[in-house]
Image (cartoon, helix red, strand yellow):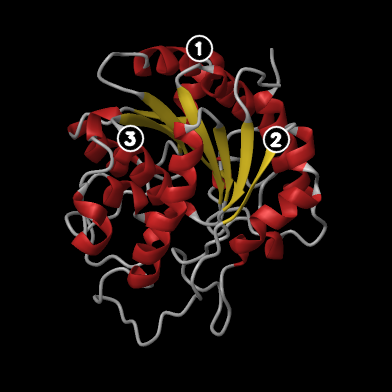
């Protein structure tokens, strides 16, 4: 386990950035933190207690496609509060592990780090989460748009909190685990010089080799460090079906651990988000147990 810094587990059980899975329901990913705590993740990480940042109520009201991001006011209120908690621990030299929630919680981490300096992001995700008005007919779910928002693309009430737009610069972002079939997405990101490594490329080049090279690339004077964002849907649905968009041909658990371990061990890595796993879609709890094991194994010394 990590010994040089205190690992602190913070719950960010927000589901504000996802569409309802069915009429009259809300996304169950807000239960992620509780499910991983039930599997003793705090004790297994030898972590300190960072508490909970409670989100506003999920309520899309009369939202219709074309109205912008739903729950935007709630996300705009929640993001600075989550950023306050993360900023406190990063400044104290702790290593926050933030248990989501959907991917919109990444805005909290990005805002926190933007307050402090200039940081990079290693996003481990099946999709690019880069939907914005420039490439889509309309936006709506911030959980599929948080990278676009964090890099300054979208409505100003989310992109320019505290006048700090953008929270991330394009050149400071790295993406891992996008499915090989998403060629158009990869082309857009490549044109912006945002490096993308697909699942097939991870297998060809080696997860550990890529992660070490990425950690080294973030160790440059212009950056104060980097954050890791983990979306459980990067895993193959055969082992992680309990996500809102289970795309085939994902990473296997051992590949994900090999990718995460060098990133999290880097001295200039300052924190981790874990997102999207939905206990409502995992009645036996096996996917949650696997996710907890992966996170714990990723922190283990090789």
The residue most toward the bottom is 62
Q: What residue do we see at 70% from left, 60% from top? A: 279
Pick the front one: 171 or 187? 171
Where does the image place residue 159, in percent across and percent down from the top left? 24, 54
Q: Nearer the viewer, residue 51 or 158?
A: 51
Q: Is residue 227 above or below residue 207?
A: below
Residue at numbered disc 3: 116
Q: Quadrant of residue 174 in the image? A: top left
Q: Is residue 266 left or right of residue 289?
A: left
**Secondary structure type for disc 3:** helix
Q: Nearer the viewer, residue 220 or 295?
A: 220
The residue lying at 57 percent from left, 26 percent from top is: 260
Q: Where is residue 100 shown, x and y percent of the image?
A: 57, 53
Distance from the alpha carbon under mark 2 to that under mark 1:
28 Å
Q: Secondary structure at mark 1?
A: helix
On the image, the x and y values in percent for residue 184 come to 28, 43
Residue 103 appears in view: yes
Query: Does any portion of residue 155 appear in the rendered image?
Result: no
Q: Nearer the viewer, residue 2 or 153?
A: 2
The quarter of the image holding the N terminus is: top right
Q: Are marks 2 and 3 in contact (CB under 8 Å)?
A: no
The 10 Å Cα crowd at callout 1, few under 14, some 14 to 19, many 20 or more, is few
Quote the CA–CA distance across marks 2 and 3. Answer: 23 Å
Q: Give the structural element (helix, strand or loop) at label 2.
A: loop
Q: Which residue is mark 1?
A: 209
Q: Specify the quadrant of the image occupied by residue 70.
A: bottom left
Q: Residue at x 72, y 49 (%)?
A: 36
Q: Where does the C terminus fall, quadrant-wise?
A: top right
Locate residue 63 relative to residue 243 in the image: left or right.
left
The residue singled out by tag 2 in the image is 47
Dot 3 alpha-carbon crowd within 10 angstroms: few under 14, some 14 to 19, many 20 or more: few
């Amino acid at each position: 386990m990590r010994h040089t810094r205190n690992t602190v587990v913070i719950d960010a059980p927000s589901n504000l950035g996802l569409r309802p899975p069915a009429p009259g329901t809300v996304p169950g990913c807000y239960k992620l933190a509780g499910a991983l705590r039930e599997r003793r993740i705090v004790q297994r990480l030898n972590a300190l207690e960072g508490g909970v940042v409670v989100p506003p109520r999920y309520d899309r009201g009369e939202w219709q496609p074309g109205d912008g991001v739903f729950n935007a006011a709630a996300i705009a209120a929640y993001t600075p509060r989550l950023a306050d908690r993360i900023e406190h621990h990063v400044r104290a030299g702790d290593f926050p592990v933030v248990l989501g929630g959907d991917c919109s919680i990444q805005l909290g981490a990005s805002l926190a780090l933007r307050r402090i300096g200039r940081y990079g992001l290693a996003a481990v995700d099946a999709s690019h989460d880069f939907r914005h008005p420039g490439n889509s007919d309309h936006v709506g779910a911030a959980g599929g748009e948080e990278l676009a928002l964090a890099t300054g693309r979208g409505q100003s009430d989310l992109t320019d909190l505290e006048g700090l737009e953008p929270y991330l610069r394009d050149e400071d972002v790295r993406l891992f685990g996008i499915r090989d079939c998403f060629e158009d997405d990869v082309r857009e990101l490549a044109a912006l010089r945002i490096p993308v490594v697909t699942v097939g490329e991870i297998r060809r080049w080696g997860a550990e080799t890529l992660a070490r090279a990425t950690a080294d690339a973030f160790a440059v004077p212009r950056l104060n460090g980097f954050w890791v964002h983990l979306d459980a849907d990067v895993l193959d649905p055969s082992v992680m079906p309990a996500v809102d968009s289970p795309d085939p041909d994902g990473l296997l658990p051992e590949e994900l651990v090999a990718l995460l371990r060098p990133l999290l061990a880097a001295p200039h890595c300052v924190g981790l988000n874990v997102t999207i796993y939905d206990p409502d879609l995992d009645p036996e709890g096996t996917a949650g147990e696997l996710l907890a094991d992966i996170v714990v194994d990723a922190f283990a010394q090789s």
